[in-house]
């Protein structure tokens, strides 16, 4: 399956898919903000969903390029399990947008993990986004390898942005 995803489909076909993850969720995004999701008719921070996944034993990895704003940090502080349970790397070079679900499906596209990119924003307040959602093993494996190269610090040695890196993977 390879499915084209645009605009509001990011919320219904990508972000909503996170709640069904059983073992691993890898998220790569340049920008991350206090994105909200619908849970039984109630708007809740996506971070609450991540906290629930971690409580269930799901490995959640997050790579993002810059520190999120105060609203995100305020929501983050509401879920103490995220302090130690969320595996996080900050890399100023990351510009890819990927979500990898249980090593079986991958979203690869333009949408950052923000309300306008992937969240609950109304149709007139959303970014114009595009991406693919696939369970094609070759594409999923390639996405995982690219994510993992950054995660392992393989790209750090030649990065030339170490002076801007607040979360050095490799020194």
Image: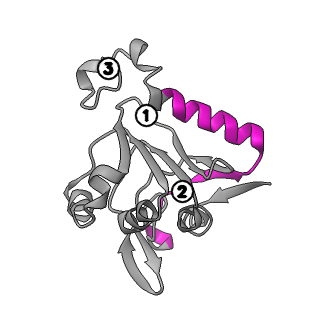
Looking at the image, which is closer to me, 150 or 55? 55
Residue drawn 43% across the image and 34% down it: 94
Image height check: is 64 above or below 125?
A: above
Separation of residues labelled 1 and 2 (CA atoms):
20 Å
| Lower sequence index among marks 2 and 3 | 2
Separation of residues labelled 2 and 3 (CA atoms):
30 Å
Tell me where residue 29 sits by quadrant: top left
Q: Position of residue 40 (x, y in %)?
A: 48, 86
Seen as rendered, the residue at the extreme right is 1
Q: Position of residue 161 (x, y in %)?
A: 32, 20
Quadrant for the N terminus in the image: bottom right
Q: Is residue 82 left or right of residue 145?
A: left
Q: Which residues are magenta?
A: 123-149
Residue drawn 43% across the image and 61% down it: 116
Q: Is residue 131 left or right of residue 57?
A: right
Looking at the image, which is closer to me, 104 or 32? 104
Q: What is the tally of numbered marks visible in this picture?
A: 3
Image height check: is 124 above or below 91?
A: below
Query: What element does badge 1 sit on?
Result: loop
Q: Are marks 1 and 3 in contact (CB under 8 Å)?
A: no
- Pair 1/2: label in front: 1
Q: Which mark is residue 128?
A: 2
Query: What element does badge 3 sit on?
Result: loop
- Residue that carries the numbered disc 3 in the rendered image: 161
Looking at the image, which is closer to me, 52 or 57? 57
Q: Position of residue 140 (x, y in %)?
A: 68, 42
| Lower sequence index among marks 1 and 3 | 1
Tell me where residue 64 sits by quadrant: top left
């Amino acid at each position: 399956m390879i499915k084209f995803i645009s605009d509001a489909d990011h919320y219904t076909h990508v972000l909503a898919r996170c709640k069904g993850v059983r073992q691993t969720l890898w998220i790569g995004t340049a920008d991350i903000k206090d994105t909200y999701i619908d849970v039984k008719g109630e708007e809740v921070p996506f971070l609450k969903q991540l906290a629930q996944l971690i409580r269930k034993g799901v490995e959640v990895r997050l790579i993002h390029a810059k520190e999120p704003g105060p609203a995100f940090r305020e929501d983050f502080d509401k879920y103490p399990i995220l302090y130690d349970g969320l595996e996080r790397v900050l890399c100023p070079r990351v510009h890819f947008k990927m979500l990898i679900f249980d090593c079986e499906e991958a979203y690869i596209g333009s949408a950052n993990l923000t309300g306008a990119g992937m969240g609950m924003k109304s149709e007139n307040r959303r970014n114009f986004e595009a991406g693919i959602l696939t369970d094609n093993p070759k594409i999923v494996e390639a996405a995982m390898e690219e994510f993992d190269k950054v995660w392992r610090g393989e790209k750090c040695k030649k990065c030339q942005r170490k002076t801007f890196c607040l979360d050095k993977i490799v020194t």
